[in-house]
Amino acid sequence: MTQTQPFATESRTFTWITPGQGDVARLLELDGLGQLEAMIAGEMPHPPVMDTLGMTDMRAERGRVVVEMPAAGFHYNPLGSVHGGVISTMLDTAAGCAVHSTMAVGEFYTSLDLTVKFLRPVTVESGLLTCEGSVIQRGRRTALAQAQLSDAAGRLVAHATSSCMIFTS
């Protein structure tokens, strides 16, 4: 019988504010870009998924959002690269928030689909990942957005398109 070696372990702790806490009434008075700007400024809580994945920065303008996150070991799949679900979440965040930035007061959206193309492996050595989302077409009921994820060297590592349904409360 072979004796197994213990594995090295690491830990990570984070906290978040439960969505719906705080001044929700104020948030609902803002358009989509205003909501994102309030979250970026720390006036309103940002989504817990940002803390879960370790996203470090978000910038927004109407129809365009950039999110950043350093590639980390806790993002890895069993093969030793960043899990495709983590990459997809970054792409979905950037594309979805780009659509969010176009919402009028009282408008909401939800993603209908996300099509992802993985172009190269992402590892800790990839460094700071930057994901830019932009709206391609915004109609009354649907929007089409895209997102591009690049590594610290500026190489494109993944691309996505997303269709979103727009509705009112």
Image (cartoon, rainbow, N blue to C red):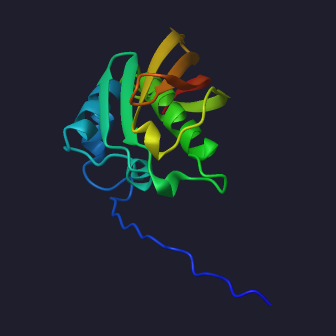
Q: Residue at x 38, y 33 (%)?
A: 67
Q: Vertically, is 136 above or below 157? A: above
* x then y, percent, for residue 66: 37, 26
Image side of residue 122 versus residue 3, left or right = left
Image side of residue 83 versus residue 57, left or right = right
| Residue 78 quadrant | bottom right
Residue 31 in view of the camera: no
- Quadrant where the image shows the N terminus: bottom right
Residue 146 in view of the camera: yes
* x then y, percent, for residue 4: 67, 83
Image side of residue 43 versus residue 17, left or right = left
Q: Residue at x 38, y 53 (%)?
A: 51
* x then y, percent, for residue 55: 37, 44
Q: Residue at x 49, y 37 (%)?
A: 90
Q: Residue at x 29, y 49 (%)?
A: 45
Q: Vertically, is 58 above or below 65? A: below
